[in-house]
Amino acid sequence: MKRWKPWAAAAAALTVLATVTACTANSPDPFGGGKKESGLTAEQAMAGASEQVQTVYKQNCLSCHASNLEGRMGPKTNLQQVGGRLTKEQIVKQIEQGGGGMPGFQGKLKPEETAALAEWLASKK
C-alpha cells in the first residue's frame, strides 16, 4: 500500500498543474495583453456590468482574469482595457472558441450571455 503514496501525490500535482495550464501566461495572449492598472477595485472593474454579466464573469472568468480584471496569470490575462484592443465581435469569437491558453465557452454559455459579456468587455477602454 505504501508504494501508492508517491503515485497519488504525483497524480494530485499533475491535476493542479493541468488546471493552472488552462490559464497559462506562456501562451499567446487571447485578449492582446494590456497594462495593469494598479489600484483598480473589483467594484470599479465591474462598473457598468449587469447582474447577468457579473454572474457569468464570476462563474466563468474570475479564476483566470481576477475580480478587478487585471489577470491572475500575468499581464496576458489582463482585461482592464480589452475594448481598446479588440472589437465586440473579436471578443465574442475569443470567448466562444478560446485559444492562446484560454478554453472556449461555446456550448457552456448561452449566446445571450456571451453577447452581454462581450459588449461589457468591449466597453473597457
Image (spheres, rainbow, N blue to C red):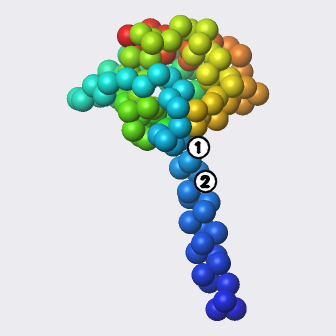
Residue 39: image location, x then y, percent? 23, 29
Q: Name the image quarter holding the N terminus.
A: bottom right
In the depicted view, which residue is nearer to us: 122 or 18? 18
Residue drawn 66% across and 89% down? 3
Residue 107: image location, x then y, percent? 76, 27
Q: Whole-Å distance between the Cαs marked 1 and 2?
A: 7 Å
Q: Are marks 1 and 2 in contact (CB under 8 Å)?
A: yes
Q: To which residue does mark 1 refer? A: 22
The amino acid type found where label 2 is placed reads Ala
Residue 34: image location, x then y, percent? 37, 23
Q: Name the image quarter holding the C terminus.
A: top left
Residue drawn 65% across and 78% down? 7
In the depicted view, which residue is nearer to us: 46 or 29? 29
Q: Secondary structure at mark 1?
A: loop
> Local crowd at mark 1 within 10 Å, few (<14), some, or many (≥20)?
some
Q: Is residue 105 left or right of residue 16?
A: right
Residue 30: in sight, yes or no? yes
Q: To which residue does mark 2 refer? A: 18
Number of labels in the image equals 2
Residue 116: in sight, yes or no? no
Residue drawn 32% across and 21% down? 44
Q: Secondary structure at mark 2?
A: helix
> Local crowd at mark 2 within 10 Å, few (<14), some, or many (≥20)?
few
Residue drawn 53% across and 41% down? 23
Residue 96 - label: none
Vertical placement of 53 versus 6: above or below? above
Q: Residue reaching furthest right? A: 107
Vertical placement of 116 versus 110: above or below? above
The amino acid type found where label 1 is placed reads Ala
In the depicted view, which residue is nearer to us: 69 or 48? 69
